Every structure is written in structure tokens, then in C-alpha cells.
Amino acid sequence: MMAITHALIATAGTSLILGTADPLPLGLAILGSQLPDLDTTQSTIGKIFFSISSWIEDRFPHRSITHSLLATGFIAAIALSVGYFLLGDIKIAAALPLGHLLSCFSDTFTKQGVQLFYPVPAWAVSVSNPRRRLKTGGAGELWVLGGAIALLCFGIYLANGGGITQKVSQSLGLKDGIVQVYNQNASTHKVYASITGVWASDRTVADGKYLILGTEGSEFVVTDGKGVYKTGEQIIISKVTTSVGEAATTEIRNISFNDEEAVASLQELRTAYPNADIYLNGQLTVDFPEEVKIPIEPNQMVTAAVMGSSIRFSYCELDRAIALLREQFAVGTVEVKIVRPTKQIASR
């Protein structure tokens, strides 16, 4: 039973400390948690690696060299060399020695304790009263086991949400945390912002759920399907949290025009991606800019503007861009952002 307790303590601690729910480092932490008990052939790992365990058992007392910081350092030197320099992942490199260290530390709460500072023969115990120490298989260990399971679930929950820092940012409504969530998930899902705030124009309530289209520094561009808005400009926020929505893929394309009719190429995009959300960024020079009439839209971000002989687009919705560019020949390049549901991709 102690092997299971060690494994759960190691995975819970590793998940919390490294901020990961990745099965590989958690699995390495479990392996590391079993290594201290290689010094006895009665342990699970000792039975598996009987010859190694028997050799150690004949030469060293139980809970001495394999339960020490010396052993942790030896394991760390090997793991860091392999995991970091060959695999390039510090979390994978740290998981094995961290699992070993957490297992050794947990054993300091047992009746016998461990020789944590071997070769110094002193026994390290965390509770001075022997009656308060844990007994293997006793009720105290069951409580520890339950606590480790709860911590493991909590660690995985935090890791899947971006870690402790991310959860705090979400709870406080900090914009930097929202940007991080968007950057982590925008390539595979739609990311929504639940905003508490007011419209900058008249300070009326702007609370609602908005789809995040992109970020500009610590601010972000959002839409509610009726218009496009930028935080810090159109919407003054007091609190914002995020949620990851339906699966979707974001594709970025560049379309160039060489004095050719602009609408045809843009209509081809709509035909190719009928259910996608498509937005344009960039600037095109047109023949008759004076004929482009852009209506004033209260509370909305300026997604299209005439600048001399050019039209500048900033998160301009495709159908709107088509309407503005009718009967215009264009020169220049625009960036096209295509957000389409994953189901559509599978059916194509």
C-alpha cells in the first residue's frame, strides 16, 4: 500500500510544482517515487528488480542510501542530462528526481524516518512524538492517501487551466491572463471572453460574452456577432474571464492584388469557407476611394477606413469588405484570418 501512497504523493506534488498534467512527467514521477524502496526485496520495485534490490539490501540498511538527498542528486544529474539536453524539456527532466525527493520526504513522517542526509547516520523524522508518526497500512496512511488523491485532482485541474498563475489571473480578471489563455488555445478552439464593463462612448453597460478575434499587446479584439470591439478603446472592462469553446482551426493567408478586381478573390474565399468567420487586415490602394462610403457605427472599432487613395482594414469582416470594394480595382496585400469549425474541416 505504501507504494501506492508514494506514487500518489509524487504525482500530486509534481503536478502542482511543475504545473503539468502531461502523462509522461507524471509517469516519471511515479517511477521516481518507487526508486527509494530498491533497498529492500520486499517492496514492489524490489521484487521486479530483485537482483539489484538484493545487492543493495546486502550492503546498506533500509531507508538509508536510497532514501537520501545524495541519491536524489545522483538521479537528478542523470535525468537532467537525458531529459533536458536530449529532449529539451525541463519538466520531463525534473519529474524523475522530484518524484524520488517527494517520496523520501513523505517517509520522514513514518515511525522509522529516513537517513535523508546519508552518509550521516542520523534519522530524519518530521514529527518528534513517535505516536504521531504514520504507520504503514494504518488509518493515518489512508488519510494521506485520500489527501494525495485530492491534491492530484487539484493539480491536474490547475495544469489544464494554465497553472496557478493563470487561475489567479482568471479569478482577478487580469488581462494578461486572458491573453495567455487565448494564445494557448486559439489555434484549436474558439476562445470567449466574458466581460464586465461599460462602453467608452456613453458608459452604459457592455457586459456580455464575446468571441476573441486577436490580441494587441495586453488588449484584445472581440466580437459579439453584431460588431467588432477593442478593449481599452470601445469597451472599458472592470473584469474579464475566459472560456474555451467549440473546436475550431485558425488559418492565416495572404492575398495579393495587382490592379485587379478585388471582389472576385474575396468571394472565392466565401465559397471555399462557407461557414467560417473571415476577417481582413491590411491596406489596399483602390481606383476610386472617394466612392467608398463607410458608415459611422457607434461603439464599434473602426475596421475599415479610407486613407488617401487606400482603404485600411483592421479585423474587417469579409462580407463587409466585399461590400466596400465593389467595382474597385486594387493593388496591395491583405492578411486573411479564417476561423472555421473543426467539423467543417473533417467533411471537406
Image (tube, rainbow, N blue to C red):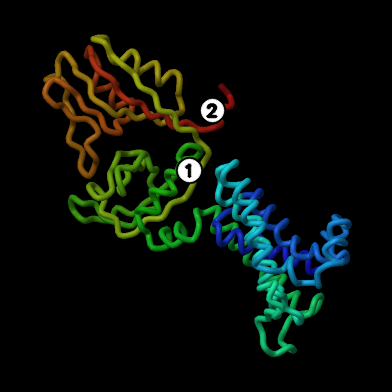
Q: Secondary structure at mark 1?
A: helix
User: Which residue lies at the image location 22% right of the left edge and 20% below the top edge?
Assistant: 284
**Residue 228 position by quadrant:** top left
Question: Residue 207 placed where, x, y %?
Answer: 33, 54
User: Which residue lies at the image location 75% right of the left edge and 60% below the top edge?
Assistant: 35
Horizontal arrangement in the rendering, residue 320 relative to residue 183 (left or right): left
Residue 266: mark: none
Above or below, 319 relative to 72: above
Residue picked out by circle 1: 185
Horizontal arrangement in the rendering, residue 213 relative to residue 94 (left or right): left
**Disc 1 residue type?**
Asn
Above or below, 31 relative to 135: above
Quarter in which the N terminus is drawn: bottom right
Q: Secondary structure at mark 2?
A: helix
Counting the numbered discs, the total is 2
Question: Residue 45 placed where, x, y %?
Answer: 82, 59
Question: In this orientation, which residue lies closer to the viewer: 211 or 54?
Answer: 54
Q: Earlier in the sequence, mark 1 or mark 2?
A: 1
**Disc 2 residue type?**
Gln
Q: Residues within 10 Å of mark 2 (few under 14, many from 20)?
A: some
**Residue 17 position by quadrant:** bottom right
Q: Tell me if residue 28 can be seen.
A: yes
Question: In this orientation, which residue lies closer to the viewer: 264 or 60?
Answer: 60
Question: Residue 265 placed where, x, y %?
Answer: 35, 14
Q: Tell me if residue 149 can be seen.
A: no
Question: Do the residues bearing badges 1 and 2 touch, measured as CB atoms within 8 Å?
Answer: no
Residue 344: mark: 2
